[in-house]
């Protein structure tokens, strides 16, 4: 068993949970001179609340990102309203703590609403871009998480304004006590990884900051399309892990972990059941191709996974079954609350269903120890 560094006794930690924006987030936290760029609260086609992230843009409903209980048959995108059928625990830290107590979850790491973050990343005005990131991050840390800094942990969004700005924002976050950051683009802003990113990896390693990638790196240049949601339909989220594989490959074969061996990268919401075969294929292709490709790594590719990566899952019974091949230290459970993948208030039942006949110390690692150790809550 690990020891808590905060004094709070942790038994279950969600490695991936979320917030949604309170109705007054932007009016209260975004600088006044950028209010004209702020997302606007509008109505969806059913009269529910929705965010319009850009002038003239589509109304983005909230139903599937604000699920607090209820049956699967009740799920729908539209018709959810603040103060009516959106639980305040989705956007208020004190209310979230009550829900954690009901669900039996001791702590959670909280990721930002990517629709809003990508909106600000599309701003051509760099100051507006940065103001939007900072407004959300300040609300998350100083507002939401201040309800209990031993249970609510904000993972703050990094901007897409080049590596120097990203490094500066990471260091500022660490000074504020933030334990982790999430990136939505390569640090230098390029379409692929490059040596220009190294300054950020170095800063993350030096400060002991885990770097999260939530499913994938985003295409921040394109505004959302209503049809994208409709096209996904019942398969929404089922192929998330496929987006993370190329990122792993790029980072390993570009030598990131040879240069920064203590860097920790978290693949958020990507699961683990696919990992063993992926590692097998990556090693096989490396041995076959390394000479003609003129690529020499210090370790076999799979070892970088075991040394440098952690993957969170919501539902992954296969991943738990093959946990030793995935890496007993390399997977962590999560709720995804309040997104529609969560099982509130039955998270403990979901955990029990996943860990039938699994030794208690191994179960503890996956539902608490791995994520707690990665973020420094446990040692």
Image: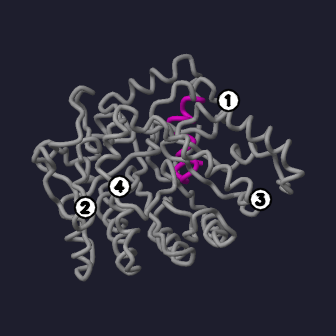
Question: Cα distance, mark 3 to mark 2?
Answer: 44 Å
The first of marks 3 and 2 along the sequence is: 2
For the residue pair 33 and 29, the one nearer the viewer reads as 33
Residue with the mark numbered 3: 258
Label 4 crowd (10 A; few <14 / some 14-19 / many >=20): some
Residue with the mark numbered 1: 324
Q: Is residue 115 left or right of residue 12?
A: left
The first of marks 3 and 4 along the sequence is: 4
Residue under the point 51% across and 29% down: 316
Kindly identify which numbered label has been placed on residue 57: 2
Q: Nearer the viewer, mark 4 or mark 2?
A: 2
Q: Is residue 305 above or below residue 153?
A: above
Q: Is residue 89 above or below residue 183?
A: above
Where disc 1 sits, the SS reads helix
Residue 378 among magenta residues? yes
Q: Position of residue 268 (x, y in %)?
A: 50, 46
The first of marks 4 and 1 along the sequence is: 4
Residue with the mark numbered 4: 113
Residue 59 among magenta residues? no
Label 3 crowd (10 A; few <14 / some 14-19 / many >=20): some
* Span colored in magenta: 362-379
Question: Cα distance, mark 1 to mark 2?
Answer: 46 Å
Question: Cα distance, mark 4 to mark 2?
Answer: 17 Å
Question: Cα distance, mark 1 to mark 3?
Answer: 24 Å
Q: Is residue 126 left or right of residue 309?
A: left
């Amino acid at each position: 068993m690990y020891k808590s560094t905060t004094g709070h006794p942790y038994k279950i930690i969600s490695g991936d949970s979320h917030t949604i924006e309170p109705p007054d987030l932007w009016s209260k936290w975004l600088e006044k001179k950028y209010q004209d760029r702020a997302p606007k609260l509008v109505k969806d086609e059913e009269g529910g609340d929705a965010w319009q992230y850009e002038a003239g843009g589509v109304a983005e409903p909230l139903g599937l990102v604000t699920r607090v209980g209820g049956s699967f048959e009740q799920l729908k995108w539209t018709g959810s309203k603040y103060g009516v059928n959106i639980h305040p625990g989705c956007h208020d830290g004190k209310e979230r703590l009550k829900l954690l107590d009901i669900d039996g979850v001791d702590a959670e790491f909280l990721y930002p609403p990517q629709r809003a973050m990508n909106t600000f990343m599309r701003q051509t005005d760099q100051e507006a871009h940065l103001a939007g990131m900072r407004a959300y991050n300040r609300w998350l840390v100083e507002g939401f998480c201040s309800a209990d800094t031993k249970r609510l942990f904000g993972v703050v969004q990094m901007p897409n304004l080049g590596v120097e700005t990203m490094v500066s924002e990471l260091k500022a976050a660490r000074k504020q006590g933030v334990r982790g950051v999430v990136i939505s683009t390569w640090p230098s802003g390029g379409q692929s990884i490059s040596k220009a990113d190294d300054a950020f990896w170095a800063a993350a390693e030096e400060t002991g900051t885990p770097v999260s990638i939530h499913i994938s790196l985003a295409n921040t240049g394109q505004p959302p399309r209503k049809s994208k949601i409709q096209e996904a339909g019942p398969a929404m989220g089922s192929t998330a892990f496929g987006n993370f594989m190329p990122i792993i490959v790029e980072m390993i074969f570009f030598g990131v972990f040879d240069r920064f061996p203590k860097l920790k990268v978290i693949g958020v919401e990507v699961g683990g059941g696919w990992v063993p075969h992926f590692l097998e294929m990556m090693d096989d292709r490396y041995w076959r191709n390394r000479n003609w490709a003129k690529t020499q790594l210090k370790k076999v590719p799979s070892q970088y996974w075991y040394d440098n990566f952690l993957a969170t899952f919501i539902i992954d019974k296969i991943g738990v079954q093959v946990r030793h091949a995935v890496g007993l230290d390399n997977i962590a459970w999560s709720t995804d609350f309040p997104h529609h993948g969560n099982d509130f208030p039955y998270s403990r039942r979901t955990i029990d269903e996943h860990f039938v006949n699994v030794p208690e110390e191994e179960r503890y690692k996956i539902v608490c120890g791995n994520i707690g150790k990665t973020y420094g809550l446990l040692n």
